[in-house]
Image (cartoon, helix red, strand yellow):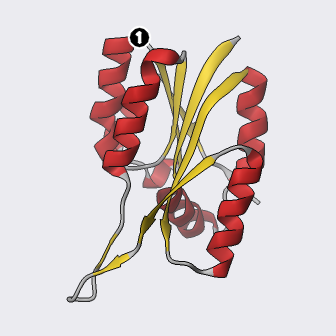
Amino acid sequence: MKHIAVFVDVQNIYYTTRDMYKRSFNYKKLWADLSAQGTITHAYAYAIDRGIDSQIKFQDALRNIGFEVKLKPFIQRRDGSAKGDWDVGITIDVMEAAPDVDEVVLLSGDGDFAILLEKIREKYQVKTKVYGVEFLTANGLIQSCDEFVNIEKDMLI
């Protein structure tokens, strides 16, 4: 049975499914689908911590499914803009997990991850799969993976 590592860019998936479909992604269905394909040995969900009750409940639901939830504080800049992405953290965790798995699954539409997927495919011969809303996913990311799964309505709540 193949070993699978799953990495979820929670903010990216939340906003892309909301913007495209006005609905939320079904993480339980994802877990069931991936579990049927192999053993999930690593599962991380990366989110921004605002301390909002609905987010806390959602994060607890992710933990109950089997994800380790990694939180970063929400940072509001003086000019009113906000900062809070996990690109470096996700990259580090993917690089650490890649030698020990057969497949890396990334849920994101962020093109910054394209070079990461190319690197782990080359260095570790690991299969890469990306889940994203195709219309809102960077072409470079789609082209960098072995398999792209377009998030469609049947994958939503």
Quadrant position of residue 56: bottom right
Front position in the image: 55 or 26:
55
Task: Answer with the quarter of the image where residue 116 lies.
Answer: top left
| Disc 1 secondary structure class | loop
Q: Is residue 37 above or below residue 133?
A: above
Q: Quadrant of the C terminus?
A: bottom right
Question: Where residue 107 sits in the image (x, y, percent)?
Answer: 52, 44
Residue pictured at 67% horizontal, 56% vertical: 25
Q: Is 90 left, or right, of 76 in this rendering? A: right
What amino acid is at disc 1?
Answer: Gln
Eyeballing the image, is 97 above or below 134? above
Residue at position x 62%, y 72% from top? Answer: 55
Please state which of residues 143 and 82 is positioned toward the viewer in this rendering.
Answer: 82
According to the picture, the residue beneath numbered tag 1 turns out to be: 125
Q: Is residue 29 above or below residue 23?
A: above
Image quarter of the N terminus: top right
